[in-house]
Image: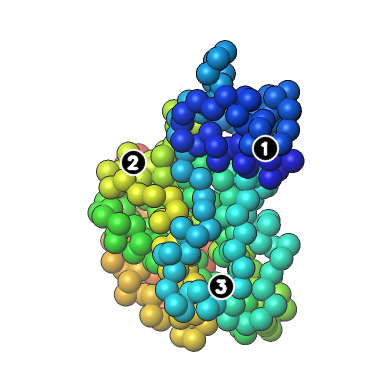
Amino acid sequence: MQQLRQRILRRLSDGHFHSGQELAHTLGISRTAVWKHVQHIESNLGLTIGAVRGRGYRLTAPLELLDEQRIRRGLSGYAEQALEAMSLMISTASTNSSAAADLPTESGRARVWLAEHQFAGRGRRGRHWVSAFGESVYLSLAWRFDLPMSELSGLSLAAGVVVAEVLQRLGLESHWLKWPNDVMVDDRKLGGILVEAVGETGGPANAIVGVGLNVRVSPKHALQIDRPWTDLALAGAPAISRNQLAGMLIDALIGACGQYANSRLAPFLARWDVFDGLCGQRVNILHGSETLTGVYRGVSESGAVVLEGSEGLSEHLAGEVSLRRAGNQ
């Protein structure tokens, strides 16, 4: 069933009309079956497919669907060698959940999952990540480290650095990083990184690096987002193929995991500073029921936030950082 629906979507992705008879003949099914599949696509994936008697079906807007061959064109030789498998899905609960069910078994190897749509996408602290069909990039990369889990705490910063660098290479100039894993433009969220680790306390451990990046969010789906947001189109980025973007992100993340395995966070610290948008500003750090206030002084060698408060400098590996605005208590 999923393969049939995927083939229908690929036929309709150009935004042109395709007759029910043509689709039925191409797929080897009845016109009634085509209609039922179209209804399922609309109701379960949130797409709008118009139907006009005598002309057929068409998507209200063309889509660039994910394509493994096009994605692989963005991979370096090192990434190709390290990539154990790539899975492209029409819809899944979340790519991180899919990754957790099929982890690499060999150190220094990666497995990647990408989806057109997530119906239970997750952000940090369990927040829902709106994941409309075909509008953004939702990917997870799993990497097996010969490291104790405690040494993976800085991996989200390393991943953030290389995501920001990819966007910079593509011509975006206004983005910055908010510790530990948000990609921002002004005070609006462009993307997020969710790192989950599983394994033995003393190692080895598998890290799942999930990346959600808004490419072009439709007005209909924007209404579902309950926090300030933006996308690459609104942020003024040059038009970019989702497949090209996915390939560049996967290549950069594989490179980051390989470098982190050998050198931990050290090679990424100066690069983090380039994009760190909070340094020198007064911030709040929410940790459980406690709120700490001070001046943000960057990150330590371990990846912790360095906060200057009334009692001097302190380091914090957990919590949520936000700007302390005038009038905030």
Q: Position of residue 193 (x, y in %)?
A: 50, 58
Residue at 50% across, 31% down: 221
Circle number at residue 233: 2
Q: Residue 136: give x, y in percent of width and height.
A: 47, 45
Mark nearest the camera among 3 and 2 is 3
Estimate the x, y position of residue 22 in percent, counting from the top left. 60, 29
Residue 158 seen in the current view: no
* Residue 32 figure quarter: top right
User: Could you tell me which secondary element the residue under label 3 belongs to?
Assistant: strand
Residue at the image point whose x is 52% and y is 53% from the top? 67
Query: Alpha-carbon distance for marks 1 and 2?
Result: 35 Å
Lower sequence index among marks 3 and 2: 3
Quarter of the N terminus within the rendering: top right
Q: At label 2, which amino acid type do we have?
A: Ala
Indicate the quadrant where residue 173 lies. bottom left
Left or right: 98 with respect to 173?
Answer: right
- The residue wearing badge 3 is 83
Q: Residue furthest top?
A: 53
Answer above or below: position of 203 versus 154: below
Q: Distance between the Cα atoms at labels 1 and 3? A: 32 Å
Secondary structure type for disc 2: loop
User: Which dot, 1 or 2, sits closer to the camera?
Assistant: 1
Relative side of 167 to 155, left or right: left
60 relative position to 274: left or right:
right
Q: Which residue is mark 1?
A: 27
What kind of residue is marked 1?
Leu
Q: Quadrant of residue 231?
A: top left
Label located before the other in sequence (1 or 3) = 1
Q: Are marks 3 and 2 in contact (CB under 8 Å)?
A: no
Q: Secondary structure at mark 1?
A: helix
